[in-house]
Image: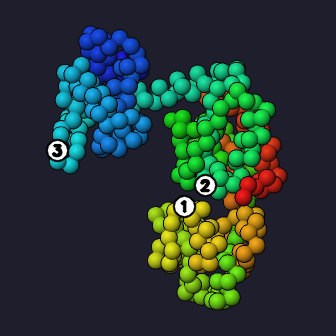
Amino acid sequence: MCIDDYGYTHIIIEQKIIANGYSNMNSKWELVRSFLAVTQSGSLSAAARQLGVSQPTLSRDIHALESNTGLNLFKRTTQGLELTSEGSKLVEAATQMSAAADLFQRQASGLSHELQGDVRISANEIVGIYLLPPAIAAFSKQHPAVHVDIVISNQVTSLSKRDADIALRMFRPSQPDLVAKRLADMALGFYAHKDYINAHGEPTSMEQFQSHTVIGYDEDRGFIEGAAELGYHLARDNFALRTDHLLAQINLGRSGAGIFATHVELARQWPELVPVMQWVKLPALQFWLVCHSDVQHNSRIRELMLFLADWFKDEPYRHCLL
């Protein structure tokens, strides 16, 4: 590593690690990666979960890095680990090293011309469970040497850090280093079980709506912020039943628990659900296919991107799996 790339402090770390027998580049990076994970998460247990390693392994990495640099990087307190002044001075260099490792991995992947290997794709619960599996099954029949990892999360995965190679997102990406294609929009609406409406009636105003059992979000504020943009002021307390899991919201609604919002085409798959509050015009969800610009020319990533773009271009729910 050169001083211009990572700074003087990192060169000191690297020289000491090499001097103490850590001549393997991957081993040296693993120690620094472990150090950075602990600084970001604040504890050994959380960092171990983040890296997918055991806590004893992570603890050994920290001890090895401290031994080979001759520095005390953390203070052990009753609350966990705290950075020392020496450790704090190395965080920026470790962060730069992590960014360089991510860049190397993305660009190396982008140079691959073989239609085989791994591709990691992320999607939220609804897309990942109901819409994506038939597409991946069809793609795998055409390209059996491509192994697909599916990450299902309602949180945004980082394409820069290679949390995923491809993402299916419900909003337009804004980062300049991402390549995105807009797919067919998805209409939204409010629904409830017909037995719930028969028992409680359908709300005809926002005031009546707030007096009903409304199924909403716990910590995710996206729905509340979206309602505010439409001129409706809601708070967490307006939701009598709360969960950030989309499938749990749907199944609560299908069980007759209350009113909830979901995809129109998905709700049509269940005859027990009826549309309500159609006087509220919910904006359609945008649907985007996204990858990082560094990997767009990777053969297997490009092939899956093209396949999904065609699969979802007109009717995303055409092959809906229920």
- The residue mark sitting in front, 2 or 3, is 2
Q: Are discs 1 and 2 less than 8 Å apart at CB?
A: yes
Residue at coordinates 60% horizontally, 84% vertically from top-left? 209
In the rendered view, does 183 fall on the left or right side of 250? right
Q: Earlier in the sequence, mark 1 or mark 2?
A: 2
Please determine whether, in this image, residue 127 is positioned above or below residue 309. below
Q: Whole-percent x and y of residue 143?
A: 75, 30
Q: Earlier in the sequence, mark 2 or mark 3?
A: 3
Per the image, the residue denoted by label 1 is: 245
In the rendered view, does 313 fall on the left or right side of 217? right
Q: Whole-percent x and y of residue 199?
A: 64, 89
Residue 222, which numbered label? Answer: none
Please determine whether, in this image, residue 282 is positioned above or below residue 33. below
Viewer-proximal residue among 198 and 176: 198
In the rendered view, does 141 fall on the left or right side of 211? right
Q: Are discs 2 and 3 less than 8 Å apart at CB?
A: no
User: Quadrant of the rendered structure where residue 317 is?
Assistant: bottom right
Picture quarter with the C terminus: bottom right
Disc 2 versus disc 3: distance between alpha carbons?
39 Å
Amino acid under disc 3: Thr
Residue at coordinates 35% horizontally, 40% vertically from top-left? 47
Residue at coordinates 62% horizontally, 30% vertically from top-left? 118
Residue 125, which numbered label? Answer: 2
Q: Are discs 3 and 1 less than 8 Å apart at CB?
A: no
Amino acid under disc 2: Glu
Q: Whole-percent x and y of residue 11?
A: 32, 17
Picture quarter with the N terminus: top left
Per the image, the residue denoted by label 3 is: 77
